[in-house]
Image: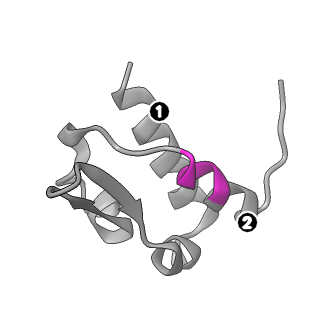
Amino acid sequence: MKVDLDKKALVDLVNGTSPNYDLFDNPLIKLCGTFNGSYGTWSWNKDNLEKCSEEQLYDLYKLCRSNWS
């Protein structure tokens, strides 16, 4: 299947994922989000995501998706 996504769709795609604990030290992951240890939740920084290139957003998505399997 081939899907054509624009930057907004890629940001939405990343927002639908979260990184595994193993990825928290990855520079791109650290740049774009934070982990709240008190609540055990991950939050993406939308402003930083929007500053990323489409390639970086796709890399973020692939990192998060593949690290959970």
Q: Which residue matches tag 1?
A: 65
The stretch in magenta equals: 12-16
Residue at the (24%, 44%) spot, across then down: 23
Look at the picture and state if 41 lies above or below 31.
above
Q: Please indicate whether residue 8 sits to the left or right of residue 53 in the image.
A: right
Q: Quadrant where the C terminus lies?
A: top left
Residue at the (79%, 52%) spot, across then down: 5
Within 10 angstroms of label 2, few (less than 14), some, or many (20 or more) residues?
A: few
- What SS does tag 2 mark? helix
Residue at the (49%, 38%) spot, across then down: 62
Location of residue 21 (image quadrant): top left
Residue 8 at what x, y percent from top left? Answer: 73, 66
Viewer-proximal residue among 44 and 4: 44
Coloured how?
one colour
- Residue 6 is one of the magenta-drawn residues: no
For the residue marked with disc 1, what is the amino acid?
A: Arg
Residue 32 at what x, y percent from top left? Answer: 39, 67
Q: Which mark is residue 28?
A: none
Residue at the (30%, 52%) spot, across then down: 41
Looking at marks 2 and 1 on the same chain, the residue that comes earlier in the sequence is marked by 2
